[in-house]
């Protein structure tokens, strides 16, 4: 790190220039969805920690979590702090903490720098970084999180600080005296005594947890958000028909017992998975693979209820003669409960919130109580079959009922689609189109009267197509090309030091958008960036930008789209310009001519 000082009126501006190695980036101070933020602590010895002005980073996809949007520093980055003139001749300390990452590995960096504020320094107007300081000076600086030391002397400086940096040897003194140092190191070790708005529903014992768990499971059957699941269960009961004879009564009881077994199996599996993996309730459904599986199952059930095809094994349509009625009832209970659990948070929050703080055995017992409550109506139907008389008699209305349930299921599939990331929507819709075709083909050509060989061949082909489509949707997305927004300071500082591609664009320029969609695509830019090691700079003219217009005029143009290629070295002053609309071959030839074949 290079530390420079400049006089700005009655204050001193400190510029801390950090050069990040080529091929690496550091997460910005405001790092976005992932990453370890870059933090600098600047303090005069014995004084308060002073605020630091951090530049904004460049937005990109994270290398290691392609769904996360992060902000990073690349190349040379300059941080600033401000001192009063009384700080001249005083020692200072800079602590730096950041994470350097390439596309293959990350290296944590924790270093400290010491020095003395010099007696002589240039004026701010003479500093090479004065433009960057003027740009950041209007922003709110950040102050490192440090423990307060009330007895420390008052700070000097023009910015409000409010927290005091401990002496340089404070940590060693605390360790020698036996004082406990917080393990987190960030001062966020809180001791709280929470109060609850309704203490009567808070769980404090296993008995209360079991009672409320059974009640919550029972109410889960009637929650509006699981209306499609509720219709599954009603359909299963109607499927059994009358219970006047012994065979009908036996089928009715078997259906309810196996349905309840499916419910209990799912809750047992959830308890084991969540307890052993130390996951919170509902966290399992944040996994895109599980959400996509749920979406496909619901969509297939909807097509089945709409009469497109007969879904093997899990067929919920009333009046059908199931080939394996016990398996069908069991899977129906398993799947319908699985689809209901994401909506159970409002009922189970307090119960499971307490259960997840207990050992695994207690957690499983509480889950069993919830499953018992959900399965209770069907167990009661087994004990008192005459209760089924409250259900309507089977008739022609059931076909209409099937279609209504089918539309409910498609609506549920639409809801599950909305949970998935927006960038996945087009891919998932393509998969659903493929699934629809496979379902129609099965229903049309692979019915019960079709030759067994055709059914097996179509089934294997459909499963392979579906697996390939799911892999395609869930495949990792390559990081987006790293565009840097144009700034005159950065452009002039990097001109000639590295190859650059400048794209002039604007939201009101349809030809620019056409070029970005056909020539300057993400895939091509990633390949070219890897081949030539060039910097991608986007010059946005959507709003007025005097510097950008002057650069455009210097390139001999007053219209966009325009792409300019700046070579490193002496050739930087003679950029190669591509005007208006051009093709991929023209750009590839220009890149090879400007940056050299690699």
Image: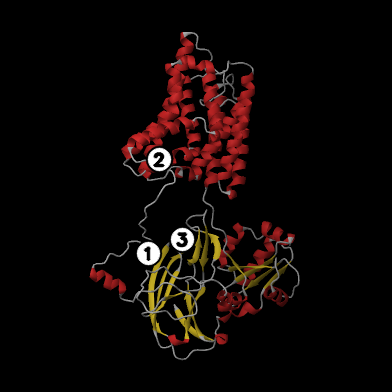
Counting from the top left corner in percent of width and height, residue 101 is at 45, 64
Q: Which residue corresponds to mark 3?
A: 35
Q: Which residue corresponds to mark 1?
A: 187
Counting from the top left corner in percent of width and height, residue 584 is at 67, 60
Q: Quadrant of residue 299?
A: top right
- Mark 2 surroundings: few (<14), some (14-19) or many (≥20) residues within 10 A: few
- Extreme-left residue of the structure: 177
- Mark 3 surroundings: few (<14), some (14-19) or many (≥20) residues within 10 A: many
What residue is rendered at 48% in x and 20% in y? 325
What is the quadrant of the C terminus in the image? bottom right
Q: Earlier in the sequence, mark 1 or mark 3?
A: 3
User: How many angstroms separate mark 1 from mark 3 (CA)?
Assistant: 20 Å
Mark number displayed over residue 200: 2
Q: Earlier in the sequence, mark 3 or mark 2?
A: 3
Counting from the top left corner in percent of width and height, residue 559 is at 75, 69
Count of marks overlaid on the render? 3
Q: Nearer the viewer, mark 3 or mark 2?
A: 2
- Extreme-top residue of the structure: 245
> Does the CB distance between marks 3 and 2 fall below 8 Å?
no
What residue is rendered at 52% in x and 48% in y? 475
User: How many angstroms separate mark 3 from mark 2 (CA)?
Assistant: 41 Å
What is the quadrant of the N terminus in the image? bottom left
User: How many angstroms separate mark 2 from mark 1 (CA)?
Assistant: 34 Å
Can the viewer see residue 308 in this picture? no
Viewer-closest of 421 and 225: 225
Secondary element at image label 3? loop
Secondary element at image label 2? helix
Viewer-closest of 437 and 137: 137
Secondary element at image label 1? loop
Q: Earlier in the sequence, mark 2 or mark 1?
A: 1
- Mark 1 surroundings: few (<14), some (14-19) or many (≥20) residues within 10 A: few
């Amino acid at each position: 790190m290079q530390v420079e000082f400049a006089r700005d009126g009655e204050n001193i501006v400190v510029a801390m220039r950090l050069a990040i190695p080529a091929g690496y980036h550091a997460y910005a101070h405001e790092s976005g969805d992932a990453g370890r933020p870059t933090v600098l602590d600047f303090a005069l010895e014995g004084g308060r920690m002073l605020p630091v002005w951090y530049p904004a980073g460049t937005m990109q996809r994270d290398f290691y979590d392609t769904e996360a949007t992060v902000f990073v520093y690349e190349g040379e980055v300059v941080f600033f702090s401000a001192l009063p003139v009384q700080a001249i001749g005083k020692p200072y300390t800079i602590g730096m903490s950041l994470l350097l990452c390439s596309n293959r590995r990350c290296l944590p960096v924790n270093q400290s720098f010491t020095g003395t504020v010099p007696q002589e320094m240039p004026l701010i107007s003479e500093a090479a970084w004065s433009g960057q300081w003027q740009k950041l000076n209007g922003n709110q600086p950040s102050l490192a999180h440090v423990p307060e030391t009330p007895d420390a002397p008052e700070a000097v400086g023009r910015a409000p600080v409010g927290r005091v940096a401990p002496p340089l040897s404070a940590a060693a003194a605390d360790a020698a005296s036996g004082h406990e140092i917080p393990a987190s190191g960030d001062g966020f070790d809180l001791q709280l005594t929470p109060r609850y708005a309704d203490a009567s529903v808070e769980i404090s014992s296993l008995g209360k947890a079991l009672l409320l768990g059974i009640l919550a499971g029972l109410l889960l059957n009637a929650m509006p958000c699981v209306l499609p699941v509720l219709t599954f269960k009603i359909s299963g009961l109607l499927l059994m028909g009358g219970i006047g004879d012994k065979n009908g009564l036996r089928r009715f009881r078997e259906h309810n017992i196996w349905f309840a077994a499916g419910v209990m199996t799912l809750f047992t599996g959830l308890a084991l998975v969540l307890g052993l993996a130390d996951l919170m309730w509902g966290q399992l459904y944040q996994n895109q693979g599980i959400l996509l599986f749920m979406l496909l199952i619901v969509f297939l059930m909807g097509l089945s209820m709409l009469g497109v095809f007969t879904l093997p094994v899990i067929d919920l349509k009333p009046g059908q003669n199931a080939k394996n009625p016990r398996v069908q009832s069991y899977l129906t209970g398993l799947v319908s409960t699985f689809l209901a659990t994401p909506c159970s948070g409002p009922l189970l929050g307090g119960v499971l919130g307490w259960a997840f703080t207990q050992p695994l055995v207690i957690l499983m017992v509480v889950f069993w109580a919830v499953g018992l409550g959900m399965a209770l109506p069907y167990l009661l139907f087994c004990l008192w079959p005459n209760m089924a008389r409250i259900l309507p008699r089977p008739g022609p209305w059931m076909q209409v009922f099937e279609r209504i349930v089918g539309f409910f299921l498609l609506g549920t599939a639409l809801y599950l689609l909305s949970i998935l990331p927006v960038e996945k929507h087009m891919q998932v819709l393509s998969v659903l189109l493929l699934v629809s075709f496979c379902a129609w083909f099965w229903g049309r050509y692979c019915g019960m009267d079709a030759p067994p060989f055709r059914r097996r061949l179509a089934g294997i082909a459909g499963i392979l197509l579906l697996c390939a489509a799911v892999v395609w949707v869930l495949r990792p997305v390559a990081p987006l090309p790293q565009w840097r927004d144009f700034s005159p300071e950065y452009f002039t500082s990097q001109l000639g030091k590295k190859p650059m591609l400048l794209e002039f664009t604007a939201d009101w320029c349809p030809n620019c958008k056409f070029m970005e969609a056909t020539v300057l695509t993400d895939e091509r830019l990633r390949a070219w960036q890897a081949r030539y090691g060039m910097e991608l700079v986007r010059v946005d003219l959507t709003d007025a930008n005097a510097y950008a217009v002057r650069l455009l005029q210097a390139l001999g143009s007053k219209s966009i789209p325009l792409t300019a290629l700046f070579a490193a070295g002496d050739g930087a002053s003679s950029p190669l310009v591509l005007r208006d609309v051009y093709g991929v071959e023209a750009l590839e030839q220009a890149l090879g001519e400007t940056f050299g074949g690699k």
